[in-house]
Amino acid sequence: MFSHQISGDIYLKLLELNDATDLFAITDGSRNYLREWLPWVDGTKSVDDSKSFIEMTMNQYASNNGFQAGIWFCNQLVGCIGYHAMDWANRKTSIGYWLAEDFQGHGIMTQATQALVDIAITEYKLNRVEISAAVENQKSRAIPERLGFEEEGCLHQNEWLYDHFVDHILYATLQSKWKR
Amino acid sequence: MFSHQISGDIYLKLLELNDATDLFAITDGSRNYLREWLPWVDGTKSVDDSKSFIEMTMNQYASNNGFQAGIWFCNQLVGCIGYHAMDWANRKTSIGYWLAEDFQGHGIMTQATQALVDIAITEYKLNRVEISAAVENQKSRAIPERLGFEEEGCLHQNEWLYDHFVDHILYATLQSKWKR
Amino acid sequence: MFSHQISGDIYLKLLELNDATDLFAITDGSRNYLREWLPWVDGTKSVDDSKSFIEMTMNQYASNNGFQAGIWFCNQLVGCIGYHAMDWANRKTSIGYWLAEDFQGHGIMTQATQALVDIAITEYKLNRVEISAAVENQKSRAIPERLGFEEEGCLHQNEWLYDHFVDHILYATLQSKWKR
Amino acid sequence: MFSHQISGDIYLKLLELNDATDLFAITDGSRNYLREWLPWVDGTKSVDDSKSFIEMTMNQYASNNGFQAGIWFCNQLVGCIGYHAMDWANRKTSIGYWLAEDFQGHGIMTQATQALVDIAITEYKLNRVEISAAVENQKSRAIPERLGFEEEGCLHQNEWLYDHFVDHILYATLQSKWKR
Amino acid sequence: MFSHQISGDIYLKLLELNDATDLFAITDGSRNYLREWLPWVDGTKSVDDSKSFIEMTMNQYASNNGFQAGIWFCNQLVGCIGYHAMDWANRKTSIGYWLAEDFQGHGIMTQATQALVDIAITEYKLNRVEISAAVENQKSRAIPERLGFEEEGCLHQNEWLYDHFVDHILYATLQSKWKR
Amino acid sequence: MFSHQISGDIYLKLLELNDATDLFAITDGSRNYLREWLPWVDGTKSVDDSKSFIEMTMNQYASNNGFQAGIWFCNQLVGCIGYHAMDWANRKTSIGYWLAEDFQGHGIMTQATQALVDIAITEYKLNRVEISAAVENQKSRAIPERLGFEEEGCLHQNEWLYDHFVDHILYATLQSKWKR
């Protein structure tokens, strides 16, 4: 319905309740792959859990606090990308994303992330966009690196993943450095 | 950002807070024209009123109760269209719309309305879509008539417009009758 | 406690939590009869469901959005009548009602409905009161017809009843036409 | 609309928003008289204050926490009576009341209070009903005394009245002692 | 963490969620002893019930409506004391407390109660502090008597304890009578 | 009332509404000094603004999301320290603080911060505590450096201060590295 075209094959769409079945299916289908770096996978046990997540994102959107979008590739839901929250006072935000296992390697996430940085800077007039990724999550780190984000530091034991903490690399770009 | 393309020139977009200035401008610019048939025009006195309206529509969307979209024509906000509410139990809704004075006559609203009926029936799986228009509001009545809605009745003194009641014609279409 | 006397035998009373047992009993006792035209009967499985309904009606009343009243006949709760919602901007409302099977044929509902139209017009200063009934629900249609409501149209597939849609006839009366 | 008849001339009615004008008028008309014993009189400066009070009482009613009723005498609003709150766990409540200056001496408040004790004990199945009155407020103290309440104690400096504290006599009756 | 030292061995601390386990343990360990005079003991069946109670008290505190504190004796949680609610308009409150069976007889509760009266009068600037206790609960009555509260009356059947009502003695002290 | 003693002269206390006057006074008295590094100073124009801040912190505390404490030195309110929020899932938090101009140089803030790290790690069982400070705010940076926090990175244009962005140094300590 409401979508943001990224390239011929790829578009983003605000997640809606009737996406819950598809969202759960790709989560469930990539479970082992996704849980290596995502803390919420084990807690997503049924379509109702995906529904609750979507309701939460709809409230985030309605509170003017950013949004979560589904990523469609060849008319199939293949992952998610969104802003964690909007810090309007300091005009900054951070971006999170994940992609189902079978759709890696097409440059989908790099393009989707580029789109979200564009939207943050040109539409929401933000000044700073952060991305953080686990030190050993090479695929995730490649995105901000490819997009010219600057590495700002290493945050020790920044995230709990089921049974251990992981360190994060913090990347950021600024309005003044972002070229389309 | 998130938009629904209707034709080369026309797209719909969920209203967001940064649309408030434009929304107020076209309301204010068509004030005399719009107030003939719309009850909320006199109460829209500043950008803050448009902001409040947009916040209300964001909450409507987040409550899974339909949405209000802006209509963009040649990259300019020219009007609004939306669902008043979703009656999920009976799988029906009704559509309301308005267009600034200068953009009448391009078939914009007919196409936008067709899009919302399509979305209601194919995406939201609704069964019945209503449109009601004041008996003497020929421009508004032409939309459902052009789209093949059936006239179901005349509702006497159905709406209060500043200083008088107006009668409404009720139109509806059903999933079984709607052909794309 | 707080009641509205209609005739020697009949009075209305705002539903309160201690009416839940009686309300469930008459629903349960007329289950087959009521479910032919009422969509909520199958979902009313215990006194707690009736309690939830009453809590909802108490909130409706507290929000100045109309009320639901029980109908007492010979000091026995025999049915319900109420306003679906108040449209203060357009000064209109609509009325819904049901009566347990054993108490049909005493003119109870015609008198109760007349009372609610009176209250809507004289106390709440409304201008328009609607009643809609399924085309084949003769008993329900007889009420507005007996009270001089005008038939305004036929709404196709307007309500979902468990496994099929039903068409509704829409009736209305106006302040200017209503004579006590 | 919904009323509780007490005698030929007197009835109680749940306060509704359209009673605000009358309620403010009798408050304003008895201002000097009422403020001797009532702490809220000086804060009631306009119809909007009476409206806020009525909204609060509608929410009290909807929360199953008792109600505030207007007292009508010869079809005129002359005062208020209500339960401060319901203590369902201990099955007790307390009653408060006031009457405009011109309607003193007709036994109105004794009858209204008797009605509220009856409702508390027979309809709400409460066990204990309290009334407290300032030691020197002879008119108010006469009500529970006339109705056979027992004096249980004297509460020192129990209430703040604009510029001084007043002592209260606490009266109570029990279900076992209350005879209709 | 945040505590109020009363004597070398005794301090009060606002209850926090990580106190739930200890709070449930002492409740469970004194169950028979406590239930003689406390109505909530039978309803406290698990640590989650103690957690719910603590959440309630944290909201009470955040609403500026008084607080509930745990009583620590020799670094062990041994009971609770708190204000039921704050009546800011009339500058009064009432105090409730309980102590686990094994810690009776050390003067703990007298000191804790004295502290809460001090806080009420000197920090919250209240004028009147009440304590009520069941007529036959000698241990509880001894506290206000020892602290010089005045006995103001006997409230019949004031509290429901599982299967019977109990009468209460009401005690109070005033700012003008309270000497440190 | 409820306090956390840090040394003979210094204690922390949860901020309460009756601290608003003092809190505003020290803000107002250090206005020029504080606004160099704190974004909220210009928006704090009256005691009511300090009251609103305190209400916000009481709700933070009641939501189990950390707390803001006042810092008392020689029985005088001299500054604030608190947790921005609690990230229970990842067991981490961050600390913010400020001190009125006249009380710099006594080691007050180092001791207060040490106390909050202690509480975070030993009472709240958190694993990671962050402090971030503007690159050129030497006084603020000295605190985590003195306490052995590790410098993890530099966040460009991380905060908006009235008319310009400032870069921040991010410091952190971990449970495993924190020695009492």
Image: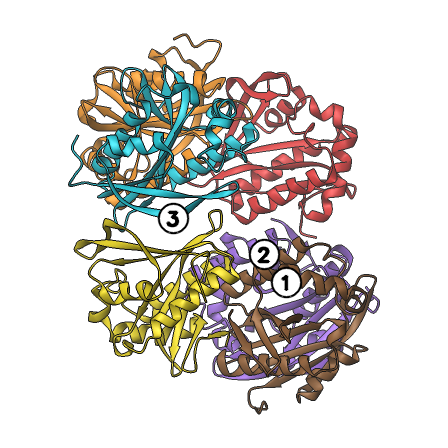
Chain colours: A cyan, B orange, C red, D purple, E brown, F yellow
Camera-side residue: C45 or C145?
A: C45
Asked whether the residues under the numbered discs 2 and 1 touch, taking CB atoms below 8 Å apart as contact, a structural biologist would say: yes
Q: Position of residue C46 (x, y in %)?
A: 74, 36
Q: Give the residue type at disc 2.
A: Gln
Residue A147 position (above or below residue D137): above
Tag 2 and tag 1 share a subunit: yes
- Which sits in the foreground, B81 or A34? A34
User: Residue D36, can we see it?
Assistant: no
The chain ID associated with circle 1 is D
User: At numbered mark 3, what does the secondary structure look like: helix, strand or loop?
Assistant: strand
Residue appearing at x 28%, y 15% in the figure: A8
Kind of residue sitting beneath label 1: Ala
Q: Earlier in the sequence, mark 2 or mark 1?
A: 2
Q: Is residue D161 visible?
A: yes
User: Could you tell whether F113 is left or right of D164 in the image?
Assistant: left
The residue that label 1 is drawn on is: D85
**Residue D60 numbered tag:** 2
Query: Can you tell which of label 3 and label 2 is closer to the viewer?
Result: 3
